[in-house]
Amino acid sequence: MGRDRAATGAGGHEAEAGADRGRRAVRRLAAARFASTGGSQAAQVALAYTIYQRTGSAAWVSASLVASAGVVGLVGPLSGRLSDRGDRRRVMVASEVAGAVGWMAVLLVDTPALLVLGALVATAANAPFKAASGASIPNLVPADRLPWANGVIATASNASLVAGPLLGGALVGAAGPRSVFGLNVVSFLVSAALIARMPGTFRQAPAGATDGASLASAAATTAGRWRPVLRDPHRRRLFAVTALSFGAFGITLVADLPLVDHFDGGSVAYALLTTLWGAGAVVGSTVAARIPARRERTALVLGTLAMGVSLGSIAVMPNLPAAIVVGTLGGLGSGVAFTPWYSLLQRASPDAERGTTFASAETFEQASFIAG
């Protein structure tokens, strides 16, 4: 009996230690996401504003947005395969380093065409990061902590939407766009360093898998295959939610600069449109982290409706401050919606194809974004 109590105590200590490692890993991943996403958002603002100032063309703004964000979905098959066959931590680190190298190249060019091309290559090189990180989270924490983990990471990502565009807009005016591109390079390297030191397990080992080689072999049967992912009606519906949402984002993002110009705003005013959307999303994702699993679908529906009403209302606002306030409410809805969306998609996906699932979602999202 004494041995039983000792074993129980030891098991409890091991479980507590594992939970602590999971919390530390999630917080480190959240810090990494804040750094790299914030840098990317700042660079996106700097790129779009610079392109618009040089060309005065909304079409060129569209090209810059596709290059700095939308192209991610085009490399979805590769992202999914790497995330499900490779070491997910290594995939994340390599993606962040590749993104840093790509944006370093952007510093060396000057014409609108080369700026857009450089951003496109950098963004494509960094694309596997999101699929690998989304696939890893359920392996870092117990199932009952999944809403908390996704909430922490979503809050960090949304906070970067506040800090990144505001900093980008301010630096463009004070030091020029090259300073923002350089900041983005540093942010990617900081993120890579944080992820390289993350504790925890990033993949669920199949029965009988004891080493990396057997694990890769077991995962290879489904890795990168979209057919089983798309055959699942539950995941298809979740894909549709974000595809439609990102299509709307694509339409409105192109309209933001002409809107600011119509109201005689500057780079900071343009950055505020995204910054305060992000501020609302921070609040929304913080709230969503406390939503129990049984309420996740309801939160997804209500948050999506709030985004739609916000985006539609901006078009009829009489001035820029009113448009920014309405956008902030839309950001709140996005935080409430997308945090449970992650949890629902993770639960619906077997670990061996979870990276492919997130890469598929990214492809549908960004294809809709590009079309928008």
Image (spheres, rainbow, N blue to C red):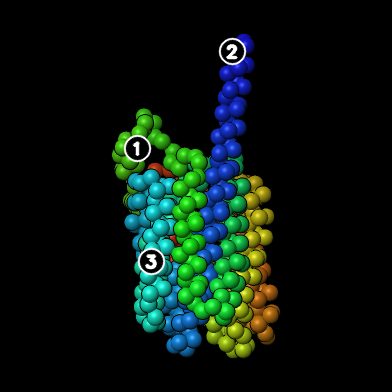
Residue 229 appears in the rendering: no
The quarter of the picture where residue 209 lies is: top left
**Cα–Cα span, label 1 and label 3:** 30 Å
Nearest the camera: 198 or 230?
198
Residue at 54% over, 82% down: 257
**Alpha-carbon span between mark 1 and mark 2:** 35 Å
Q: Nearer the viewer, mark 2 or mark 3?
A: 3
Measuring from the top left, give residue 308's x and y in whole percent: 59, 70
Please give the residue where the numbered disc 3 appears in the rendered image: 102
10 Å crowding of disc 3: few (<14), some (14-19), many (20+): many
Pick whichever of labels 1 and 3 is earlier in the sequence.
3
Residue drawn at x 54%, y 85% is 258
Q: Which residue sits at x=39%, y=80%?
A: 110
Inspect the image, locate mark 1, and give the three-letter code of the amino acid beneath it: Gly
Element marked by disc 3: helix
For disc 2, the neighbor class at 10 Å (few under 14, some 14 to 19, many from 20) is: few
Q: Secondary structure at mark 1?
A: helix
How many marks on residues?
3
Q: Can residue 62 be spotted in the picture?
A: yes
Marker disc for residue 212: 1
Front one among 299 and 176: 176
Q: Position of residue 25 (x, y in %)?
A: 54, 44
Ranked by sequence position, the earlier of labels 1 and 2 is 2
The residue nearer to you, when weighing 251 against 82, is 82
Q: Do the residues under discs 2 and 3 have CB atoms within 8 angstroms?
A: no
Amino acid type, label 2: Arg
- Which kind of residue does numbered mark 3 sit on? Gly
Q: Is residue 154 above or below residue 371?
A: above
Horizontal relation, residue 347 to residue 370: left or right: right
**Label 2, on which residue?**
3
